[in-house]
Image (cartoon, rainbow, N blue to C red):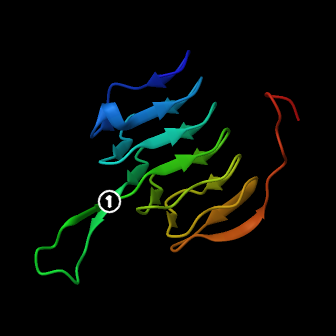
Amino acid sequence: MGPNCHFYPGSKIWAPWNLICADQVTAADGTEIYNPAPVTFGSHAILSQGAFICGATHDYDDPGFPLIAYAMSFGPYAWVCARASVAPGVNMGEGAVLGLGSVATRNLEPWTVYAGTPAVKVKERQRVLSGKV
C-alpha cells in the first residue's frame, strides 16, 4: 500500500496479499475486490460505493470447473464509479472512467469515459497530470 491510501471500513478485499496500490488509492464502502491473482491500482485510482472488481471465473468447458484467475491493473487516475463492475482480466488505462452501474467486459482505453452494459466508449476525458489540468 502506497502512502495516503484510504480503504473505507465497508470495503472488502478477498486476498489482501494480492493487492498492490500506489499512492492515494481510495475504495469506498461497499467496494469489493475479488483478487485471487494480483490486482494493481495506480496512484489516485478510485473505487466508488458498491464497485465490484472480479478477478476470476471458472473454465466452464472443463468438467472439473477449475478456477481461472487473472492479474488486473487499473491505471493512475482511473475511476470505477458507484455500482460498476469490472469483469475478470479487464484492465483500465490511465484516467479511464467506468460510469455508474456499468459493466466492463473489455479493456478500457486511457482517458476515456465508458458507460452501459456492456460498457461502450461515450467520450474522451480531459487529461490530468499530477492533479493539474
Circle 1 residue: 56
Residue drawn at point x = 66 percent, y = 38 percent? 76
State the residue in front, 105 or 80. 105
Residue furthest bottom in the image: 61
Q: In the rendered view, tell whether residue 12 sits above or below residue 107.
A: above
Quarter of the rendering occupied by the C terminus: top right
State the residue in front, 93 or 114. 93
The reply to whether residue 11 is visible in this rendering is no
Residue drawn at point x = 84 percent, y = 48 percent? 126
**Left or right, 129 with reference to 79:** right
Pinpoint residue 81: horizontal percent, then vertical percent: 55, 49
Pinpoint residue 108: horizontal percent, then vertical percent: 63, 61
Residue furthest right in the image: 133
Q: In the rendered view, tell whether residue 60 sits above or below residue 96.
A: below
Residue furthest left in the image: 64
What's the residue type where badge 1 is placed?
A: Ala
Pinpoint residue 13: horizontal percent, then vertical percent: 31, 37
Residue drawn at point x = 29 percent, y = 65 percent? 57
**Left or right, 121 with reference to 88:** right
Count of numbered badges drawn on the protein? 1
The reply to whether residue 102 is visible in this rendering is yes
Which quarter of the picture shows residue 33? top left
Which quarter of the picture shows residue 55? bottom left
Residue drawn at point x = 71 percent, y = 46 percent? 95
